[in-house]
Amino acid sequence: MTKEDFCKRLKDINLTQKEFSEITHVPYSTLNNWGFHDIQVPKWVGPFIEHYEKAKKYDAIKKMILDSKEVL
């Protein structure tokens, strides 16, 4: 994953680099270095973003189900 791909994926899931840094406990300065010189985006980042995105969808579904139970 390139730095550009990383930034695009974060934008797609409405997450800033700062928020990603806080969630993953990766220093923000480390994130900024990804893609410069020979520092690549780590391989775990792609799968992490995919799982994060799925978790957000499941949380939304769970909330809808719980909210609908309150109406009944």
Image (spheres, rainbow, N blue to C red):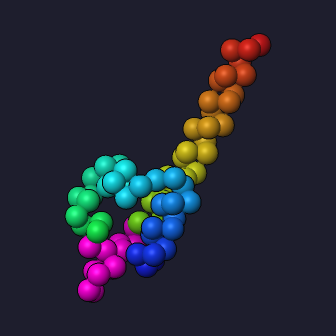
**Res 50 visible:** no
**Which residue is outermost to the bottom?**
38
Note whether 66 is above or below 71 in the view shown.
below
Note whether 21 is above or below 43 in the view shown.
above
Name the residue: 34% across, 79% down.
35
- Magenta-highlighted residues: 33-44
53 in magenta: no
Q: Position of residue 15 (x, y in %)?
A: 46, 53
| Left or right for 9, reference 26 | right
* Quarter that holds the N terminus: bottom left
Quarter of the image holding residue 59?
top right
| Left or right for 21, reference 72 | left
Q: Position of residue 65 (x, y in %)?
A: 69, 28
Q: How many marks?
A: 0
**Which residue is outermost to the right?**
72
Quarter of the image holding residue 72?
top right
Note whether 50 is above or below 59 in the view shown.
below
Name the residue: 67% across, 22% down.
67
- Nearer to me, 64 or 51: 64
| Left or right for 1, reference 58 | left
User: What's the magenta bit mostly, secondary-structure-wise?
Assistant: loop
Q: Position of residue 9 (x, y in %)?
A: 51, 65
| Left or right for 37, reference 53 | left
34 in magenta: yes
Note whether 61 is above or below 11 in the view shown.
above
Name the residue: 62% across, 30% down.
63
Name the residue: 31% across, 74% down.
34
**Res 5 visible:** yes
Q: Position of residue 25 (x, y in %)?
A: 27, 52
